[in-house]
Image: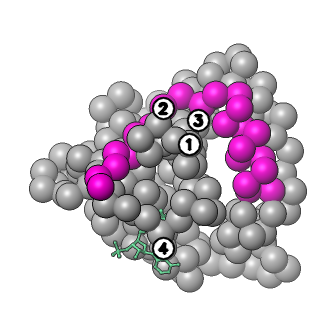
Amino acid sequence: MVKRVELRMVAESDLDVFDAAFQSEAGASEYQWFGFTPTHGLRDALRTRALLAGPDNMLSVTVDGELVGRVEWLERRWGRRDTSLCWEIAIGILPEQRGRGIGKAAQYQLVSYLFTHTRVERIQATTDPENQAELACLKHVGFAHEGVVRRAQWRLGRWHDQMLFSILRSEFEADTRNPLREGIIGV
Ligand SMILES: CC(C)(COP(=O)(O)OP(=O)(O)OC[C@H]1O[C@@H](n2cnc3c(N)ncnc32)[C@H](O)[C@@H]1OP(=O)(O)O)[C@@H](O)C(=O)NCCC(=O)NCCS
């Protein structure tokens, strides 16, 4: 039976689910576990600006209405803000929902949303060179590999490189036959 991946605004109860799911190495995954992280800032940002229209933003990911994870986009600049702003995207799918095709569909939806509703030319993403699932997701969405940011993250007691990827507005618009366009997953 086909199921549809959609993005919606974050509800306060979603943050409880994310806290329970992602505040451990097993839940966050070895690639996203930086130790316990305070989330009061997220709750404040939810109350004051719905976690939107700021330098750090979030939407919830659902499959046929069921909460399955979250996507984020963060302000990044390669120079002055007015002339060099781009978004960096991030994602966390709930552990029990991984491997169903949701991660790639949700990141496609987010890139589409950001090119539709904001004027950026470039969207970037970074991931650990060993994060095979995220590497596959970015490839399916159409991201191009730009290089390696050396020793970018301290996690699990050592430094880790990050691979830098981007997709440009023109590249995304030209990719009219991407099977992720419909947001449908099979399982
Ligand atoms: C990375 C993540 C977003 C991927 O989402 P997902 O829903 O599990 O991924 P999908 O089911 O959409 O699979 C995408 C691709 O990855 C592949 N894949 C999934 N899990 C994999 C794994 N453990 N090892 C290797 N490949 C894997 C799938 O086969 C698929 O490729 P294919 O369509 O060519 O077969 C998810 O696993 C997650 O939230 N991980 C923890 C946080 C994280 O690493 N975030 C990314 C960095 S910000």
- In the visual, does 104 lie left or right of 16? left
The residue located at (32%, 42%) in the rendering is: 112
- State the CA–CA distance, disc 1 to disc 4: 20 Å
Q: Residue furthest top?
A: 48
Read off the residue under disc 1. 67
Q: Amino acid at mark 3?
A: Asn
Could you say which is closer to the camera, residue 137 or residue 27?
27
Q: Position of residue 30 (x, y in %)?
A: 70, 74
Q: Secondary structure at mark 3?
A: strand
- Quadrant in which the C terminus appears: bottom left
Q: Are marks 3 and 1 in contact (CB under 8 Å)?
A: no
**Foreground tag (3 vs 1):** 1
The residue located at (44%, 45%) in the rendering is: 63
Q: Secondary structure at mark 1?
A: strand
| Magenta segment boundaries in residue numbering | 1-23
Q: Position of residue 173 (x, y in %)?
A: 18, 46
Q: Which mark is residue 133?
A: 4
Read off the residue under disc 3. 57
Q: Is residue 162 magenta?
A: no
- State the CA–CA distance, disc 1 to disc 2: 10 Å
Mark 1 or mark 2: name the one nearer the start of the chain. Answer: 2
Mark 3 or mark 1: name the one nearer the start of the chain. Answer: 3
